[in-house]
């Protein structure tokens, strides 16, 4: 449970909408012990995540980097089907 090193601890989390200039209209996991601003947003490669959850339809490569693909379209689809608040269960 080290920021910028390990995964989100196993558990059930309330997720609420979040918006900032950099990340408009995304979601934030609430009450993750020892963590803050864990967002669900679009992005493709590891350096886009910084401890957040990236969404996409499949894995692939961007140049030499393993990547999450079709991220922006997937985020738009999720916006159309997910509520402003929901539960997310993180498992091993």
Image (cartoon, rainbow, N blue to C red):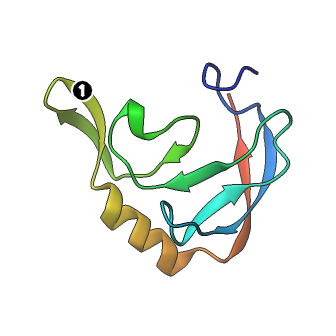
Q: Is residue 31 left or right of residue 7?
A: right
Residue sitting farthest toward the front: 21
Please say if 58 is above or below 17.
above
Quadrant occupied by the C terminus? top right
Which quadrant of the view contains residue 42? bottom left
Quadrant occupied by the N terminus? top right
Q: Residue at x 76, y 31 (%)?
A: 9
Camera-side residue of 76 and 43: 43
Which quadrant of the view contains residue 90? top right
Residue sitting farthest toward the left: 63
Q: Count of labels shown? A: 1
Q: Is residue 86 left or right of residue 31?
A: left
Residue 47 screen position, x and y as percent: 40, 32
Please say if 91 is above or below 36.
above
Q: Is residue 68 left or right of residue 30?
A: left
Question: Badge 1 local density, few (<14 within 10 Å), some, or many (20+)?
Answer: few
Residue 26 screen position, x and y as percent: 55, 65
Q: Secondary structure at mark 1?
A: strand
Q: Is residue 55 left or right of residue 38?
A: left
Residue 28 screen position, x and y as percent: 68, 57
Which quadrant of the view contains residue 2? top right
Residue 39 screen position, x and y as percent: 60, 52
Q: Report which residue position mark 1 lands on.
A: 65
Q: Residue at x 57, y 66 (%)?
A: 20
């Amino acid at each position: 449970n080290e920021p910028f090193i390990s995964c989100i601890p196993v558990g059930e989390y309330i997720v609420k909408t979040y918006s900032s200039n950099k990340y408009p209209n995304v979601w934030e996991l609430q009450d993750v012990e020892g963590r803050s601003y864990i967002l669900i947003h679009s992005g493709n490669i590891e350096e886009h995540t910084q401890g957040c959850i990236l969404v996409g339809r499949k894995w692939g490569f961007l140049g030499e980097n393993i990547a999450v693909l079709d991220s922006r379209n997937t985020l738009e689809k999720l916006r159309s089907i997910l509520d402003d608040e929901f539960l997310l269960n993180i498992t091993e």
